[in-house]
Amino acid sequence: MDYSIILYTVIALGSVALLLAIILYGVAQKFKVYEDPRIDIVEKILPGANCGGCGFAGCRAFAEAAVKAEDLATIFCPVGGNDCMKNVAEALGKTAAEKEPMVAVIRCSGSPAHRPRTSIYDGAQSCAVMASVYAGDTGCSFGCLGRGDCTLVCDFDAIHMNPETLLPEVIDDKCTACGACVKACPKFIIELRKKGPKNRRIFVSCINKDKGGVARKACKVVCIGCGVCKKACTFDAITIENNLAYIDFNKCKLCRKCVEVCPTNAIHELNFPPKKKVEEIAPAKEPVSNA
């Protein structure tokens, strides 16, 4: 048996393997992508929800953007909040502006008691599917469809469907303002607003843009765009557009004057104490003279 052939074969294969290894190493060095180690540090600080509420495709993408950004003024993690952003800023030697906490609100009050069903939908139980083929099973084509797409996308168990009102309800303490429910709603009835002091908020719980008479026939608690609330507001926080009132939460001082004058109860006040009733004091009787 000629062992020299085996030896030459081994040497040849080894040489080829070594050459390929050198080539691959050279290619790897040439096209090597440097990754800043601070990205890993920032990613560990983040809550790891990967919800996309920050506008980036997950926490890793957020960390990369934070490292590359000159400042953190336009970058914010809604789940981690101000404390998380403070830690990120310290890790990167940058500054982060504090932002007021936000929370999702439902801008529709059209329960069956206020918005009677006019037809029966028997298709796929999905708001997205229903909205693409059907205006809704009530006279209001703007309101909540009640199929709960918003509850399915919430990773924080912060929104549930009320079986009586057939409307979604937000749990303030669990809501992280990630915006997933806002994006999932095909009717755009969910909005992120400032939580406000002591979680107190005032907003128009309606997005119906039909004219007053038409809107009122479809729902008892609809905004009819009458403008009474705007006249009552002394802070220029209310605008009327397309037959619909809107309260700017940056201008609203939570005085509640608009709530009192709304003729359809379309304006909601949350987490306020009940107003004290002013009791009428009966006038004192004049003493009866015995003379």
Image (cartoon, rainbow, N blue to C red):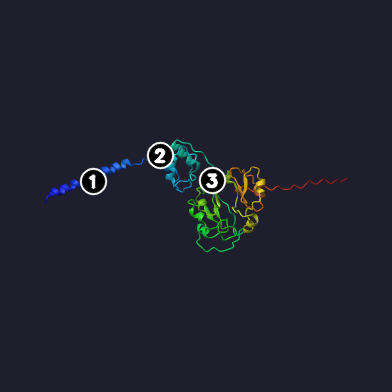
Q: Residue furthest top?
A: 93
Q: CA distance from mark 1 to mark 3?
A: 60 Å
Amino acid at the residue labelled 3: Met
For mark 3, what is the residue?
102
Amino acid at the residue labelled 2: Arg
Q: CA distance from mark 1 to mark 2?
A: 37 Å
The residue at the point 26 percent across, 44 percent down is 21
Q: Quadrant of the C terminus?
A: top right
SS at mark 3?
strand
Of residue 204 and residue 227, the one placed in the foreground of this image is 227
Residue 151 % position (x, y)? 51, 54
The residue at the point 50 percent across, 43 percent down is 81
Q: Earlier in the sequence, mark 1 or mark 2?
A: 1
Q: Is residue 35 left or right of residue 199?
A: left
Q: Is residue 163 left or right of residue 11?
A: right
Mark 1 nearby-residue class (10 Å; few <14, some 14–19, many ≥20): few
Mark 2 nearby-residue class (10 Å; few <14, some 14–19, many ≥20): some
The residue at the point 54 percent across, 45 percent down is 102
Q: Is residue 132 left or right of residue 2?
A: right
Q: CA distance from mark 2 to mark 3?
A: 28 Å
For mark 2, what is the residue?
38
